[in-house]
Amino acid sequence: MIVHGAYTVEPWRVRETELNLDVLAQSESLFALSNGHVGWRGNLDEGEPHGLPGSYLNGVYEVHPLPYAEAGYGYPESGRTVINVTNGKVLRLLVDDEPFDLRYGRLVSHERVLDLRRGVMERVCEWCSPAGTRIRVRATRMVSLTQRSIAAIAYEVEAVDRRARVVVQSELVANEQLPPSGGDPRTASVLQSPLQPEQDFAHGHRLRLVHRTRHSGLRVAVAADHVVTGPEQTTTVGESHPDLARLTIGSVLEPGQRLRVEKFVSHGWSSTRSLPAMSAQVDAALAAAGDGGWARLADEQRAYLDDFWACADVEVDGDEEIQQAVRFGLFHVLQAGARAEQRAIPAKGLTGSGYDGHAFWDTEMFVLPVLAHTLPEAVAEALRWRQRTLPAARERAAQLGLRGAAFPWRTIEGREGSAYWPAGTAAFHVNADIAHAVVHYTETTGDEDFERDTGLELLVETARLWRSLGHHDHRGVFHIDGVTGPDEYSALADDNTYTNLMARANLLAAARAVERHPKEAERLGADSEESASWRDAAEAMHIPYNSELRVHEQHAGFTRYQRWDFAGTRADQYPLMLHFPYFDLYRKQVVKQADLVLAMYTCSAEFDDKHIARNFAYYEPLTVRDSSLSACVQAVIAAQAGHLRLAYDYTAEAALMDLEDLEHNTRDGLHIASLAGTWMALVAGFGGARRAGGTLEFAPRLPEKFSRLAFRLLFRGRRLRVEITRQGAAYTLLDGPPLTIRHHGTPVALQPDTPVERPLPPPVHRPAPQQPPHRRPNTRFGSGTRTTGVRRRGR
């Protein structure tokens, strides 16, 4: 993990057995805790040393100018970037007047553990001060999944071999100094000290700071309360300043004695609420957290995760690293969405400031499908956030001369944040991705109230965009021209197959929803004439196909482009976008990430097995995977096409994207979509899971390295378990009413608690497709670990 051997491979934990300052920023992302509302990076409790300080509130941002060499009509005028809000994690420690700083003295031992079942990060270390005093520090940190605004730390200091005078300084710190940014200097200057102080308070063990962002005008309040346990002579003193509130706790410890500080931190923000109201809000949250204290918070956290894993766990026999990675991924996907509650799920979750904290189409196409089968209420909340941003999306569509809603390519609060319009504005497929998530959620849950109150409006407004964006030609064929599909190396193309297929599904879904909810549709101004026009466009949609090559084209004319000079491209010239002009990329056959291949997964009914095999074989040698979103999709289709070894390698790449820092940017935050894609690769790839309307279909197949794969998922109020072995597949309905599924096309009727076993068909053998030079995934077959893997296995 992270190119050094301090991490063990365990099924339910991520354990760091020594501190390595060279990868401190990466480990801060791995050990981040969040609940979708509050996010704390895994910084050391003492605040320093650090790689990237990070305390985030979902939706809190600052406004900054967007850079343009030449401005143009319709360009977004300003961007929005997530900010580091008031930090409540800090617990500075002094030992006999010497700061406890791991860069000085002698660090005897240091271990951190992210416990995926208990939802906490634990730390134990022993340190000998420059003066020779030895202490032991134990800390446990959590961000509550049950109390939305609360995070907490239990911090213990123990004298080991002689009397020690210790001082703990528990702080709230605003406007922390951040590492220098290599990006736009105008953005960096705006984000330097973005919080203007409004209130500071310290009384007893209570601390509070209230600030307001300089440009976006958001009010942020953070408060802390403490429970202190120690020797009788322990003292406490509170103080506050505009950007700092501190509780200083002093004590003298004899060998074996401990000073324990339990710190509860509450967070809140608003664009409209007054200063007194925000102060009262965070104080009230502390009062609720204090009822039962640390023990109750810890019990609630474990119970919440017990329920989650009972519905979501994936078991892998045969590869310990993938077993750990899929649970690590599910845990962080859960953290990203559990309590987001009508806010976006950013591409990095709340684990770092990468991508400026923006949400992309990643959420709807990678993250929400996983949550729909594991924590469906989080999906409904994420889509309600999209509904809340419809006014901005309608305004953007009107600005572009279109009807309906044009959802942004990247955003925090609903307005477009991309300064590069060919890869931003032109990527209209985000509309269909949102519609796809609506349909997936409603068909997976049967939530008719959601479809009526939220889904219908999203489907109608996205369908209107497609009808106005596309056109019928003189033969009546419907085209959508000048768009950018998922592959950002092919911008402004005509009839992108993924976009057209997803738009067709969007149009038909909207028409059906209007028929089911006529009264609500009438309120939206959607009548039978308009829905008929949607059906006409969908039925006439052009899907590019090269009959000579017998493959679908990624977009019209793609297969006639000159192929990229892969042989002349060095290994150190990837990713291509950093070494070659987009002008050249746009006119060549080279694919940044799965595009047509993604369409074969999301619109699987449109492709038969022969086309899937031929398409995959054609696009595989063109796909360079310069995006973390690609490997998981290629894993799914490789498995379906019968390339199980290749699917296995791609699964490992998606699974270990952050645990091994494969993109070399884990320091900026985790790749939440790739983590979700690990589940996708295992469940949809090797499990063959597909949704077909109101039913589930499975086509399980097992790679050679796996002796068993089992997973649980939710579907229409039922909890289902699927177990795949060499002998076959066993389906068990754990609870809920009877259910009929399909196994490799054959119906299987399930009754509660009665496993049904079915054999696996013989594997399909096809010639393995080639990848571009230097872009083949690292092979795992026969080694049990990646060729670059350096992690130690543990229990």
Image (cartoon, rainbow, N blue to C red):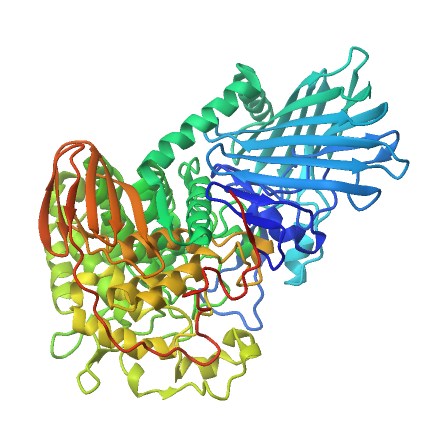
Q: At x 47% / y 64%, what residue is drawn?
A: 75
* Residue 145 coordinates in the image, percent (x, y): 46, 31
Q: Can residue 39 be seen in this view?
A: no
Q: In this view, does 264 lie above or below 396?
A: above
Q: At x 38% / y 46%, what residue is drawn?
A: 389
Q: At x 34% / y 75%, what residue is drawn?
A: 620
Q: Is residue 584 above or below residue 328?
A: below
Q: In the depicted view, which residue is nearer to us: 461 or 488?
A: 488
* Residue 241 coordinates in the image, percent (x, y): 77, 30
* Residue 546 coordinates in the image, percent (x, y): 21, 83
Furthest-top residue in this view:
232
Displayed quadrant of residue 204: top right
Q: Quadrant of the N terminus?
A: bottom right
Q: In the depicted view, which residue is nearer to us: 618 or 123?
A: 123
**Horizontal arrangement in the rendering, residue 82 relative to residue 645 (left or right):** right
Furthest-right residue in this view:
131
Q: Is residue 69 visible?
A: yes
* Residue 702 coordinates in the image, percent (x, y): 28, 58
Q: In the depicted view, which residue is nearer to us: 569 or 471?
A: 569
How many numbered dots are placed on residues in this image?
A: 0
Q: At x 61% / y 60%, what residue is drawn?
A: 3
Displayed quadrant of residue 493: bottom left
Q: In this view, does 622 lie above or below 484?
A: below
